Amino acid sequence: MKLLTILFVTFILALIGTKLYQGDWNFLFSGNLGMAAFIIFTGFAHFKFQKGMAMMIPDFIPAKMFWVYFTGIIEVAAGVGLMIPSVRELTAILLIIFLILVFLANINSSRKKINLFKGDYSGPGMGYLYKERIPMQIILIVWTWYFGIYLN
């Protein structure tokens, strides 16, 4: 849930900034900027923690490092796409699908007790999935839908 700090702090700062500079609260911009900052940050993490990320991918999927880098690029591109009004809705739809699909890797990671940052098997296990990852995934999906599709 610590990662959600990026989402919420960016959102609040953007809201304050839009109120100060535009004279009005711009929820659409601020919500999408918050998600963009979050998803770009996690996208870059694919390049820093590639060993742990590769361990998260289910065994039946080949070319794990390709998928780690590819999904990192997808996340960065999604962050950019959320900030472009003409492609925001499509980006949000694709990002929601992406978040659902990568959740399978999170289930696999929890079952194997993978520590993403160390790239070993000292992770928190299934407790993390139920207490943190599922609630966070729901927040991310609802947030993306609300600011990327509903308000758009």
Image (cartoon, helix red, strand yellow):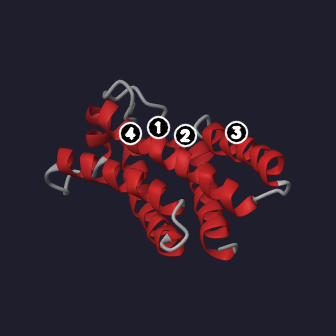
Q: Amino acid at mark 1?
A: Gly
**Where is residue 145 drawn, in percent x and y?**
61, 69
Q: Secondary structure at mark 1?
A: loop
Residue drawn at x 66%, y 65% is 147
Please give the label number shown on residue 128: 2
Number of residues whose C-alpha sits closer than 10 Å to that of mark 1, classed few (under 14), some (14–19) or many (20 or more)? some
CB under 8 Å between callouts 3 and 4?
no
Determine the image quadrant of residue 144.
bottom right
CB under 8 Å between callouts 1 and 2?
yes
**Where is residue 20 drawn, in percent x and y?**
82, 45
Could you tell me how far apart the alpha carbons at marks 1 and 2 are, in whole angstroms? 6 Å
Please give the label number shown on residue 41: none
Q: Nearer the viewer, residue 51 or 113?
A: 51
Q: Amino acid at mark 4?
A: Phe
**Where is residue 6 drawn, in percent x and y?**
61, 39
Number of residues whose C-alpha sits closer than 10 Å to that of mark 4, classed few (under 14), some (14–19) or many (20 or more)? some
Please give the label number shown on residue 44: 4
Q: Amino acid at mark 2?
A: Tyr
Determine the image quadrant of residue 109.
top left
Please give the label number shown on residue 9: 3
Q: Secondary structure at mark 3?
A: helix
